[in-house]
Amino acid sequence: MPGGLNVAITADLHWGHRKGTDATRLLASFLRDRPPDVLVLAGDIGTGSLFEDCLRLFAELPCRKALVPGNHDLWVDEDGPDSLERFERLLPEAAARQGFHYLDDGPLLLPEADLGLVGTINWYDYSWGLDGLRKHYPGEEDRLHSKRFTRGQHNDARFVRWPTDDVGFTAILLARLQRHLAAALATVGRVIVVTHHPPFYGLSFPRTGPPVLLDSFLWDAFAGNVCVEQLLAANAERIAFAFCGHTHCERDNTLGPIKGHNVGGDYDWKRLLWLRWPEGAVEAHRFGEE
């Protein structure tokens, strides 16, 4: 079909983790045997030098490639560049060396399909959990900054180091996403949004009911933010799909007319979504064992 595209989306490859290497290799082999028109990686690609090592797995693919980083990709040691420099300079340079478009720096336009890919790592400003935390667990707000749960601590507190904070970084990303979305929609008719942290609440951690436990409110606080959700809702008529990762939980949901898919996959098994555009059909492929 003229203008038709096959878009492959995956997330949470965590290359170099003690589990999952074989599953990621199987996924890459599948793509070499069945090359898409576009490959998109939705974050948590590989910590440190493993980020670029993972991208090399896809070097032979004869297609356009794009990515957003994930929170693990921003983790740093005490010595060396901080997480903001990693996000702003080192990761884009590594992506460019391996032929990947860094969506946090700008949209990837596909005019032959009247389509654009707009992406962001997305981040959290606690807004998904703040009101519930204040209502049900007053006096526990300090946990947002220490990132301490009733058991353990969010690893972002240990390995994300920068001269900003979660709220400030979220604001930077929101302003950037607004610009990129406007630029894409000025050129093409429809866009697909790709994020690492879920772009709307319905793609976050699945539950059978509203959060009750303190840790549930904290996980909500660290999962995404209201402002990006509102931005997508305001442009929903021209956003066809939203894809994300981060939670390691496969989930499908909608935000108005936007069809949302959380890729899923975990450390020891991986998942790939295959979108046929413009038909809109999405099929899933799984690699490795749960």
Image (cartoon, helix red, strand yellow):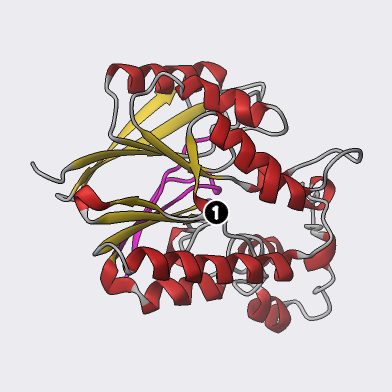
- For image coordinates 50% across by 58% down, the residue present is 198
Q: Looking at the picture, how far across and down is residue 263, in whole percent? A: 42, 44
Tell me which amino acid carries mark 1: Asp
Query: Local crowd at mark 1 within 10 Å, few (<14), some, or many (≥20)?
Result: some
Q: Decide whether residue 256 is among the magenta residues.
A: yes
Q: Secondary structure at mark 1?
A: helix
Q: Looking at the picture, how far across and down is residue 35, in whole percent? A: 29, 25
The residue carrying mark 1 is 105
Compared to residue 100, the image places residue 113 above or below, namely below
Q: Which residues are magenta?
A: 242-266
Seen in the image, is 133 located left or right of residue 152? left
- For image coordinates 49% across by 71% down, the residue present is 178
- For image coordinates 33% across by 55% down, the residue present is 116
The residue lying toward the viewer, choosing from 31 and 135, is 31
The residue lying toward the viewer, choosing from 167 and 176, is 176
Compared to residue 89, the image places residue 17 above or below, namely above
Q: Looking at the picture, how far across and down is residue 106, in whole percent? A: 49, 55
Q: Looking at the picture, how far across and down is residue 42, in whole percent? A: 49, 44
* Residue lying furthest right: 79
Compared to residue 151, the image places residue 253 above or below, namely below
Total labels drawn: 1
Residue 129 can be seen in this image: yes
